[in-house]
Image (cartoon, rainbow, N blue to C red):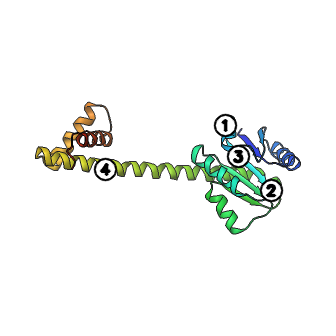
């Protein structure tokens, strides 16, 4: 079962949400005050899901959520008593997976949490794919730059330069992009820029 961190400064409202969570089977709940350092609390308690219950997100709360989303991404469910389109957009931009306005969802609480977790996981998968594509694109650029240096200084064809880079990578047990970056950096130190 997931470990939940419940953030709320209102003890009555927090107790009500905790009771609702317990009723739908969430037994491991950590309560944190609204004014506690959220990122430090997440580092300390390592929750699987963060639930925030407050009237409306303020600027400090949104900044705390951005920090958590950047440093230690987690599914975040925000229960707000009131909202407007701008506030909702700001919350989603700060990393909130589900933004619920008005009363607690009661019987739907478990499904709201499950949807937030699924949405968060999809978002993380897309983020990882994007980082992978960026890494491969950078590798390709670095390999092309290294090939250009080899072609210029050793009078090699493009295929010969690639094969030489590939051999360097294999000999050093590294990926070709990393070998290309190391080669380009070494050449730059020697003053031989492409």
Which residue is at a point 39% across and 48% down the rendered structure image?
Answer: 135
Element class at badge 3:
strand
Give the residue pinned by disc 4.
140
User: In this rendering, does residue 67 appear at all?
Assistant: yes
Question: In the image, is residue 111 above or below residue 154?
Answer: below
Q: CA distance from mark 2 to mark 4?
A: 49 Å
Q: CA distance from mark 4 to mark 3?
A: 39 Å
Q: Earlier in the sequence, mark 2 or mark 4?
A: 2
Element class at badge 4:
helix
Q: Which one is in front, 118 or 60?
A: 60
Question: In the image, is residue 118 above or below residue 163?
Answer: below
- Residue 187: x and y in percent read 23, 41
Q: CA distance from mark 2 to mark 1?
A: 25 Å
Give the residue pinned by disc 3.
50
Q: CA distance from mark 3 to mark 2?
A: 16 Å
Q: Few, some or many C-alpha atoms within 10 Å of disc 2 (few <14, some 14-19, many ≥20)? A: some
Give the residue pinned by disc 1.
46
Give the residue pinned by disc 2.
105
Question: In the image, is residue 41 above or below residue 135?
Answer: above
Q: Earlier in the sequence, mark 4 or mark 3?
A: 3
Q: Which one is in front, 19 or 178?
A: 178
Query: Do labels 2 and 1 touch, CB within 8 Å?
Result: no
- Residue 36: x and y in percent read 74, 43
Q: Earlier in the sequence, mark 2 or mark 1?
A: 1
Side of 180 relative to 90 (left or right): left
Query: Do labels 2 and 4 touch, CB within 8 Å?
Result: no
Q: Earlier in the sequence, mark 4 or mark 1?
A: 1
């Amino acid at each position: 079962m997931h470990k939940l961190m419940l953030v709320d400064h209102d003890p009555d409202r927090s107790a009500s949400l905790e009771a609702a969570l317990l009723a739908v089977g969430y037994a491991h709940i950590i309560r944190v005050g609204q004014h506690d350092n959220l990122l430090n609390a997440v580092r300390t308690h390592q929750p699987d899901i963060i639930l925030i219950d407050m009237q409306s997100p303020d600027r400090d709360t949104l900044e705390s959520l951005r920090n958590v989303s950047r440093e230690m991404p987690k599914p975040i469910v925000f229960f707000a008593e009131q909202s407007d389109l701008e506030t909702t957009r700001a919350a989603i931009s700060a990393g909130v997976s589900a933004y619920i306005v008005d009363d607690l969802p009661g019987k739907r609480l478990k499904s709201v949490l499950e949807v937030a977790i699924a949405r968060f996981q999809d978002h993380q998968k897309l983020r990882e794919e994007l980082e992978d594509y960026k890494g491969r694109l950078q590798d390709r650029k670095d390999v092309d730059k290294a090939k250009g240096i080899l072609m210029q200084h050793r009078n090699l064809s493009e295929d010969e330069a690639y094969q030489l880079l590939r051999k360097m990578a294999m000999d050093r047990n590294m990926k070709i992009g990393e070998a290309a970056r190391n080669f380009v950096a070494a050449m730059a130190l020697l003053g031989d820029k492409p």
